[in-house]
Amino acid sequence: MTTTSIKRTEELRKLQLTGGSTYTISLPKTWILQNQLKKKSSLRIRLEEDGSLSVRSSETPKKETSHEAYIQVSQKEDEDALVRKTVSAYLVGYNIIHVKAQKGQQLSSKQRSVLKAFARNLLVGTEIVIDTPEELTLQVLLSYPELSVESALRRMAIITTSMHKDTIASLQKLDHSLAKDVIATDDEVDRFNMYIVRQLKMAIQSPTTIKEIGLANARDCLGYRLVTKSVERTADHAVKIAENVLLMKKKLDDNTLEKMAEMSAIAISMFERAIEALFKRDYEAAEDSIERTKDILALEKKAIAASHKIDIEEAASLRLIIESIRRTAEYAADIAEIVLNLTVESVITN
């Protein structure tokens, strides 16, 4: 049913047996007329994931959808607000985004430089194809097969894991340079996060796209969206650890560092195991990741106790670092719970 003008009602129609071996069912006359069908018109019948059948006319042209977005900008518009508009257009699936100055005006140099830097650094597969004082046009050139959602999420998780390990190394060595590198790396995670969100939004709007982005069904789309959010938040906590390392002036004692390293090792192993459980659809591995949460809570108490013995100037930063490590473990558990929901059929017996 291709238009919203048809009232969505449910009718009960009986299956008929004709010719001894062929089953037929009549179609609503309103739908036949709406789609301009006649005797011997071709229909497309597709078996859906849930076992239902969808019937579409193969003769009615699909409604053309615009893949171009036009954003009108005044010189007074805040650069951050302009970036948010562009991000929104990118996330909902527009392939070409025109950012144009209002009639008789030009984009300010700051507006252009901020938007160009953002597009180059944070929008995966996007190129600037028009760059004039009156207009900036962005075009998304990357297609689904080139980078599936699973591949993008895997890269995102690998970067996040590396960020977390580097922050702990920067804490142990009090290496401010390494901490700054971690903060800069967060842009890579954000790039993949926005790319995945874009793909998932487009898939929800078009069931055929779900297969193209490498997923099985709509439930996978929801699960991957929640996982992606948790991975992005995990990276944010790696950044918070790095920011607190930058505030510290003295290296922590070996006992405290040992507690922090042990707590961190469990948190990041939970994260890695939860991500791998997602890709392998492994219910037991996800359950194992969740079980380790109690180990984190026990180590957190020991780490907090150790923080009482250090200088008050360092204690505040240390407490925030401990909290971020715990949050890393909690996000890992969240990911594992999503995996349980996606794979629960594997442990249900009929």
Image (tube, grey):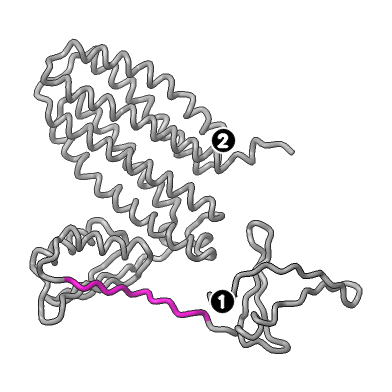
Q: Is residue 250 above or below residue 225?
A: above
Mark 1 surroundings within 10 Å by alpha-carbon count, few (fewer than 14), some (14 through 19), many (20 or more):
some
Residue wearing tag 2: 283
Q: Is residue 295 left or right of residue 118?
A: right
Question: Three-letter amino acid code at disc 1?
Answer: Thr
User: Residue 335's image quarter?
Assistant: top left
Within the magenta stretch, is there residue 67?
yes
Q: Is residue 199 above or below residue 257?
A: below
Q: Earlier in the sequence, mark 2 or mark 1?
A: 1
The quarter of the picture where the C terminus appears is top right
Q: Is residue 298 left or right of residue 80?
A: right
Residue sitting farthest toward the right:
20
Task: Kindly state the secondary structure of the residue where label 1 is placed.
Answer: loop
Residue wearing tag 1: 2
Q: Is residue 37 left or right of residue 162?
A: right
Q: Is residue 132 above or below residue 310?
A: below
Picture residue at 37% right of the left edge, 63% below the top: 92
Residue 156 spot, x, y in % from top left: 35, 46
Picture residue at 40% right of the left edge, 66% below the top: 143
Residue 46 spot, x, y in % from top left: 65, 68
Q: Which residues are magenta?
A: 62-73
Picture residue at 22% right of the left edge, 35% below the top: 240
Tell me whether the residue at label 2 lies in contact with that at label 1, contact meaning CB atoms closer than 8 angstroms: no
Question: Three-letter amino acid code at disc 2?
Answer: Tyr
